Image (cartoon, helix red, strand yellow):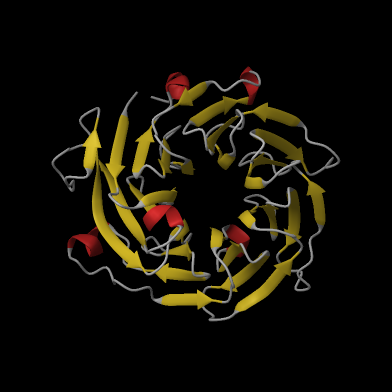
């Protein structure tokens, strides 16, 4: 299995995202002391076929390639999520333990190589009263808006050109771990919480109340994602080790269920390359690859980490290329072995 890795010494990985513009770039959001105290760092990483190019002593590889560290930005509190701007190649936002969102610029190779990436965010948005654990930057219909989900039990919608939020959404009774815009239905987003519920929302409903709330898991719900192919399908993951699929047309019960083990499913990522494929990041230190066309068992279990796996993303530019990161300070980029036969040559 081809693999590229990067070690962030004294920083523990929480989230990573591939650039929607550049196939080789990804951002990695990390926290000091496992996010319990201390600061956070945002890394701009680059895939490079030349192991001597753009690499540093923290970059290692098993196949002659390496992840290079182009720049590193610091924040005074832990960084728990990151999202690229969908309309500007060098801009991204991060979510922090101090309840704020930061918008950064200059996140491109040229700015980084010339040391022109600003060390401070261009905008800092502060309204949440507790940690912000999830961040999504709207695409298509919502590309000017940021969606934040917080441990203060609220979600907020932001116009990235304004200092104050547009709407505060209230409908969960406990910590909110994840919120995601639908990529196929305008103004619809989903959220999950440690109250076990999956909520659906209309971003244009300024009353801030959910369209629907269902008990998705009998325990904490920690992750959710939408299908990139079927507008009606989304998935949730919980501390019960279950991954459940939902259909907007019949939400009384889940339409499929996968068992990922006795530990929590921290993050889910539906593949942008195949309607049947999804990946899960788990607290049993594994990343699992699922193919719904091949049954209810994981097609591959990658035990590359020695701590919780928290971040997960598919590369939209390279078929079946996946990245994950964890509390062991490792970020990995690879193509799962079970999908290598599906690559288009």
Residue 134's quadrant in the figure?
bottom right
Residue 327's quadrant in the figure?
top left
Answer above or below: position of 20 versus 78.
above
Quadrant in which the N terminus is drawn: top left
- Residue 241 at x, y = what percent? 63, 34
User: At 44% from the left edge and 33% from the top edge, which residue is drawn?
Assistant: 319
Viewer-proximal residue among 18 and 220: 220
Answer above or below: position of 257 versus 217.
above
Number of labels in the image equals: 0
Query: Which residue sits furthest bottom?
Result: 163
Residue 313 visible, this orientation: yes
Q: Is residue 162 left or right of residue 93?
A: right
Q: Is residue 253 left or right of residue 277?
A: right
- Residue 204 at x, y = what percent? 73, 68
- Residue 63 at x, y = what percent? 24, 27
Query: Which residue sits furthest left?
Result: 52
Quadrant in which the C terminus is drawn: top left
Residue 64's quadrant in the figure?
top left
Residue 82 visible, this orientation: no
Q: Is residue 173 left or right of residue 227?
A: right
Answer above or below: position of 153 versus 227.
below
- Residue 148 at x, y = what percent? 59, 64
């Amino acid at each position: 299995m081809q693999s590229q890795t990067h070690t962030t010494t004294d920083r523990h990985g929480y989230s990573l995202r591939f650039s929607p513009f550049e196939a080789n770039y990804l951002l990695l959001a990390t926290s000091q002391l496992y996010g319990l105290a201390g600061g956070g760092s945002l890394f701009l990483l680059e895939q490079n076929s030349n192991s001597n190019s753009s690499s540093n002593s923290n970059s290692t590889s098993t196949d002659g390639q390496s992840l290079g560290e182009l720049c590193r930005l610091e924040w005074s509190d832990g960084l728990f999520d990151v999202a690229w701007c969908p309309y500007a190649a060098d801009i991204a936002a991060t979510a922090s333990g101090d309840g704020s969102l930061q918008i950064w610029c200059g996140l491109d190779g040229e700015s980084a190589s010339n040391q022109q990436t600003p060390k401070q965010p261009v905008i800092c948005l502060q309204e949440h009263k507790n940690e912000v654990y999830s961040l999504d930057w709207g695409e298509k219909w919502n590309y000017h808006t940021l969606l934040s989900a917080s441990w203060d039990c609220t979600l907020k919608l932001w116009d990235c050109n304004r200092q104050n939020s547009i709407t505060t959404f209230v409908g969960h009774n406990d910590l909110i771990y994840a919120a995601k815009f639908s990529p196929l239905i305008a103004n619809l987003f989903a959220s999950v919480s440690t109250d076990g519920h999956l909520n659906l929302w209309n971003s244009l409903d300024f009353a801030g109340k959910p369209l629907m709330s269902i008990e998705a898991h009998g325990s904490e719900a920690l992750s959710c994602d939408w299908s990139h192919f079927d507008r009606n399908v989304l998935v949730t993951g919980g501390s019960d080790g279950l991954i459940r699929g939902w259909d907007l047309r019949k939400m009384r019960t889940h339409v499929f269920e996968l068992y990922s083990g006795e530990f929590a499913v921290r993050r889910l990522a539906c593949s942008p390359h195949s309607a049947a494929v999804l990946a899960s990041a788990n607290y049993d230190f594994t990343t699992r690859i699922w193919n719904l066309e091949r049954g209810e068992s994981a097609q591959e279990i990658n035990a590359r980490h020695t701590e919780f796996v928290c971040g997960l993303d598919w590369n939209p530019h390279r078929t079946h290329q996946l990245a994950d990161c964890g509390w062991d300070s490792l970020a990995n980029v690879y193509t799962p072995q079970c999908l290598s036969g599906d690559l288009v040559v």
